[in-house]
Amino acid sequence: NPEIFNHGNAITKEQAISEANNFIQPNNLFDESILKGIITTDILKYNSTDQTFTTATSLSETNVIRVNYFRNDLDDMKILPAGFDKSYNYALYTAANTPYPRMTEINYSFWPISFDDFATYPLKSSVSAWQDLVDGYAHVAKMGNNTENNNIVIRKIYLSYYDSEEPQLYLQPIFVFEGDNNFVAFVSAISPEWLE
């Protein structure tokens, strides 16, 4: 019901996080490790013409706050989903007045990690990972404000773990490439001879 985005008071990020947690926790909707993980927010504006959300420029024009729930870092490395800064686990909160609901959408996709079952695998070199990116073997998590014809300047490269929406047997290490205009891409970090 798009009317829920036209009612209510100003929203704050803290209010959205608090109310999302207060809804999720007593209903046991998320694993406790996710609720105690890293929480971020995105402020969104509802466009009634094409019925989509776009990034709001200020809280005063915000209709919805997306509350993202990420896993905590592991060994000082981020655990990143395919969308980089968009978690599989999130709640959309609006400050709609009653009788409209405040939680307009909740999504939860969680696979437990066996922290006691691990192994060491050799990683490919950063030069090899760079070549994979150049050759088009990367997962582009965010194109940002770039086009496929742009020359994208990479500013930051680091190791992370990939958090799949599908069940996986292990947390896969990845190289993360961050570039100008919000570009982000992932490349598998494990040496190819160790992959089946």
Image (cartoon, helix red, strand yellow):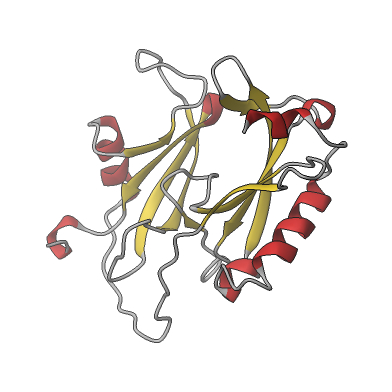
28, above or below 124, in the image: below
Q: Quadrant of residue 173?
A: bottom left
Q: Quadrant of residue 109?
A: bottom left
Front residue of this view, candidates 38 and 119: 38
Front residue of this view, candidates 27 and 74: 27
Front residue of this view, candidates 146 and 8: 8
Q: Position of residue 119 (x, y in %)?
A: 30, 78
Front residue of this view, candidates 114 and 76: 114
Residue 124 as seen in the image, left or right of residue 112: left
Q: Position of residue 44 (x, y in %)?
A: 67, 32
Quadrant where the N terminus is found in the figure: top right
Q: Residue at x 73, y 43 (%)?
A: 100
186, above or below 78, in the image: above
Q: Residue at x 82, y 32 (%)?
A: 59
108, above or below 51, in the image: below
Q: Residue furthest bottom?
A: 116
Q: Residue at x 40, y 17 (%)?
A: 151
Q: Position of residue 194 (x, y in %)?
A: 16, 65
Residue 72 as seen in the image, left or right of residue 21: left
Residue 62 as seen in the image, left or right of residue 142: right
Q: Residue furthest front?
A: 99
Q: Residue at x 59, y 14 (%)?
A: 49
Q: Position of residue 31 (x, y in %)?
A: 55, 73
**Picture mark count:** 0
Quadrant where the C terminus is found in the figure: bottom left
